[in-house]
Image (tube, rainbow, N blue to C red):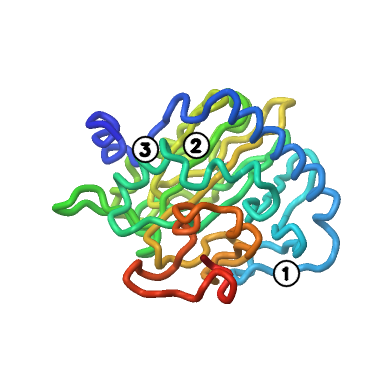
């Protein structure tokens, strides 16, 4: 993260990063997203089912491939596929992805770990309701201290195709990570909230943001389904921030950890480096 990027991230709470992925990576990831959409959408309404700990969403659990899926493949709806790392090694390139980690290490002061992994597949007509901003819980907070930017949870969104203004872009109310007052607007419609700004992106771009920032997704007014990959980071001790497994241990299968490098496994370790955790075989958490 260079000086200008650091300044801008602190000023507005997000950063658009052109060309974070290579063309080859984009094409491989796009294929993996399509394949998982195909499989998971046909099972989304089937048992076994699980209500999220927050009571927010109900999921189908595919224990064999290690993912949770919620929603439906239909106009106006979203398909959310969590824990996709378990389902396809094509996503491994995003674990300990050096260009991404350069940003994460610049804004998370304690050793960072991955706490969230979701594919968001947003069909025409769909929008993501506005949330966060201003006074949030500690785990979503943005702060600044003597050592610089000190974020709790942040997210990187990866784009595997172009997303224009009409294609349901991710949206933010810039600088609301520093606002002190509760949001005075009724409802959660991102199209109507004052200050909400859509962020168009090109295939291969990334958008980094603090969860303290007010954000959502504008209505997808095009014929194109919007598909993005979202990965959350925070201090290593933070539990899962996936909705299906909120505040539980990370759901990462032993076979997924087994194919990771030690550096990749470290991104799923929930204990300090000074403490010896359970071995991979026993604990399954690397
Ligand atoms: O991209 C969107 O539609 C919303 C994404 C979002 O809310 C998130 O990643 O936290």
Q: Position of residue 52 (x, y in %)?
A: 65, 68
Question: At x 39% / y 43%, what residue is drawn?
Answer: 101
Residue where numbered disc 2 is placed: 171
Mark 3, residues whose alpha carbon is within 10 Å: few (<14), some, or many (≥20)? Answer: some
As measured in the structure, the alpha-carbon distance from the residue carrying label 1 to the one carrying label 2 is: 29 Å
- Is the CB of the residue bearing disc 2 within 8 angstroms of ligand 1? yes
Residue position for label 1? 50
Residue 42 x, y percent position in the rendering: 85, 50
Please tell me which of labels 1 and 2 falls first in the chain: 1
Looking at the rendered structure, the number of numbered marks drawn on it comes to 3
**Of marks 1 and 3, which one's residue comes earlier in the chain?**
1
Seen from the viewer's position, the closer of residues 236 and 135 is: 236
Looking at this view, is 10 or 136 the one in front? 10
* Disc nearest the viewer among 1 and 3: 1
Q: Which residue is mark 3?
A: 174
Number of the label disc, if any, that sits on residue 28: none
**90 relative position to 6: left or right:** right
Residue at the location (58% across, 45% down)?
A: 92
């Amino acid at each position: 993260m260079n000086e200008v990027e650091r300044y801008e991230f602190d000023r507005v709470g997000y950063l658009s990063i052109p060309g974070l992925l290579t063309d080859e990576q984009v094409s491989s990831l796009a294929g993996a997203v399509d394949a998982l959409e195909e499989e998971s959408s046909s099972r989304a309404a089937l048992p076994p089912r699980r209500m999220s700990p927050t009571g927010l969403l109900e999921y189908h659990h595919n224990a064999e491939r290690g993912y949770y899926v919620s929603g439906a493949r239909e106009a106006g709806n979203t398909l959310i596929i969590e824990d996709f790392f378990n389902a396809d090694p094509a996503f491994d390139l995003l674990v300990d992805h050096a260009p991404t980690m350069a940003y994460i290490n610049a804004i998370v002061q304690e050793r960072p770990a991955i706490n969230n992994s979701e594919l968001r597949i947003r069909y025409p007509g769909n929008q993501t309701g506005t949330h966060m901003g201003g006074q949030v819980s500690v785990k979503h907070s943005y702060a600044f201290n003597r050592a610089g930017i000190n974020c709790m949870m942040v997210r990187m969104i990866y784009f595997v195709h172009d997303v224009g203004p009409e294609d349901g872009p991710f949206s933010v109310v810039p600088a609301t990570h520093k606002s002190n007052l509760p949001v005075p607007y009724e409802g959660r419609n991102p199209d109507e909230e004052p200050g909400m700004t859509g962020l168009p992106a090109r295939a291969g771009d990334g958008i980094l943001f603090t969860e303290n920032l007010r954000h959502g997704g504008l209505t997808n007014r095009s014929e194109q389904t919007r598909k993005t990959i979202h990965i959350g980071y925070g201090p290593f001790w933070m539990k899962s921030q996936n909705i299906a497994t909120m505040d539980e241990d990370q759901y990462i299968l032993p076979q997924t950890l087994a194919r990771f490098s030690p550096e990749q496994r470290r991104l799923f370790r929930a204990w300090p480096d000074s403490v010896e955790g359970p071995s991979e075989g026993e604990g399954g958490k690397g």
